[in-house]
Image (spheres, rainbow, N blue to C red):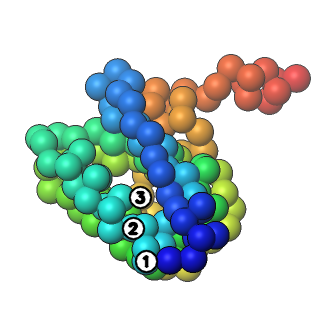
Amino acid sequence: MDTNHARLAPFHTERVVGGTTVVEVRGEIDVFTAQPLSARLDSLTAGSRPDVVLDLRPVIFIDCSGLRMLCRTRNRVLAQRGRLRLVTGDGCFLRILRAARLADVFEIHPDLPTALFGVVPQDEVSAAAG
């Protein structure tokens, strides 16, 4: 494995916010990194009615392996009658989802507060009003 790739390998943090598991993924999601991340998401979605938010804003690259991992996670969550939300504001990532015909498959939010609570952050409300 090339040392530059190891530096950009995704890592993630997990926390629970009001019963929802928030997983922030950083780095690249590709053929080398999707499988370990998928295994972790499998364990997080194994229970009944999983509620998961994947914060993908810090992801700098995703390939078809990453898209497959997202689809697998979505299918596991739906099979358990749970909910999966993606957080991304990256236009490039959204274009990739549209090109793969996956944009309407996922629940996508521009920021974490909207994904978690369905509310627009106060600073955005103030900016829109002013």
Find residue 31 and report its image quarter: bottom left
Task: Inspect the image, locate mark 1, and give the three-letter code of the amino acid beneath it.
Answer: Val
Q: Which residue is mark 2?
A: 34
Mark 2 vs mark 3, foreground winner is: 2
Task: Inspect the image, locate mark 3, and give the three-letter code of the amino acid beneath it.
Answer: Phe
Disc with the residue nearer the chain's start (2 vs 3): 2
How far across and how far down the image is residue 99, in percent? 55, 79
Contact check, label 2 and label 1, Cβ < 8 Å: yes
Q: Is residue 113 above or below residue 103?
A: above
Mark 3 vs mark 1, foreground winner is: 1
How far across and how far down the image is residue 63, in percent? 51, 76
Q: CA distance from mark 3 to mark 1?
A: 21 Å
Local crowd size for mark 2, using a 10 Å CA cut-off: few (<14), some (14–19), many (≥20): many
Residue at 50% across, 57% down: 10
Q: Which residue is mark 1?
A: 31
Q: Which residue is mark 3?
A: 106
* Mark 2 secondary-structure assignment: helix
Which residue is at the front of the view, 23 or 71?
Answer: 23
Left or right: residue 67 compared with residue 80: right
Residue at 68% across, 20% down: 122
How far across and how far down the image is residue 127, in percent? 82, 27
Q: Is residue 115 above or below residue 77?
A: above
Left or right: residue 19 compared with residue 53: left
- Give the tally of numbered discs: 3
Task: Inspect the image, locate mark 2, and give the three-letter code of the amino acid beneath it.
Answer: Ala
Local crowd size for mark 3, using a 10 Å CA cut-off: few (<14), some (14–19), many (≥20): some
Which residue is at the front of the view, 36 or 68?
Answer: 36
